Image (cartoon, helix red, strand yellow):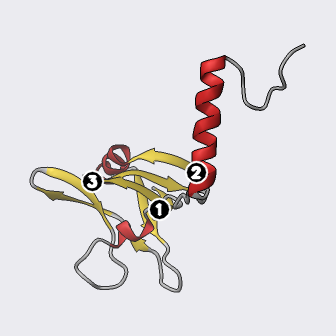
Amino acid sequence: MTEHIIEFVARDRTGITTVVTANGVTDADTVIQAITAGHSGYAVAASGVRPAPVRSLMALGTPYLFANWDGSKRNNLHDLAFTAPIRTLPPAPPAGVRLRMAIVATLASLFGRHPETPPSR
């Protein structure tokens, strides 16, 4: 049986959707089928802890992936979920500059020329 170590997971509001290992990216349904059939084993190597096996459990008639390396009742696999970086917006220009930009853009649209373009001769 092939053993895969899970590095990251992707999740949405329904749960784990994708698993990332050193071998590549795999859909969670494929991982569940491989675990259930006994073709492949999956584990999570949390820092400082021996690899914890990933199991396929049933809840409300739907299989899901579960790993527990800290002895709690919660699914530690969610701790490996990739978090998207937070995008920060550039600071808004001061109110006076915004007003000037709005006036220049309005005049440019009325007279059909870009405000940075010098008039043609």
Q: For mark 3, give the secondary structure.
A: loop
Amino acid type at mark 1 = Thr
**Quadrant in the picture for residue 116:** top right
Q: Which residue is mark 1?
A: 83
Pointer 1 local density, CA inside 10 Å: few below 14, some 14–19, many at least 20: few
Q: Is residue 92 visible?
A: no
Residues 115 and 66: in front is 115
The answer to whether 104 is drawn above or below residue 32 in the figure is above
Q: CA distance from mark 1 to mark 3?
A: 14 Å
Q: For mark 1, give the secondary structure.
A: loop
Amino acid type at mark 3 = Arg
Pointer 2 local density, CA inside 10 Å: few below 14, some 14–19, many at least 20: few
Q: Are marks 3 and 2 in contact (CB under 8 Å)?
A: no
Q: Is residue 66 visible?
A: yes
| Label annotation for residue 99 | none
Q: Left or right? Give the position of 40 relative to 12.
A: right
Q: Left or right? Give the position of 39 relative to 106.
A: left
Kindly identify the residue that appears in the image at 10 percent across and 50 percent down.
Answer: 61
Percent position of residue 91, x then y: 60, 60
Q: Which residue is mark 2?
A: 23
Percent position of residue 66, x then y: 29, 65
Depth check, mark 2 against mark 1: the one in front is 1
| Label annotation for residue 13 | 3
Q: Are marks 1 and 3 in contact (CB under 8 Å)?
A: no
Depth check, mark 3 against mark 2: the one in front is 3
Q: In the rendered structure, which disc, 3 or 2, sits on the residue that comes first in sequence?
A: 3
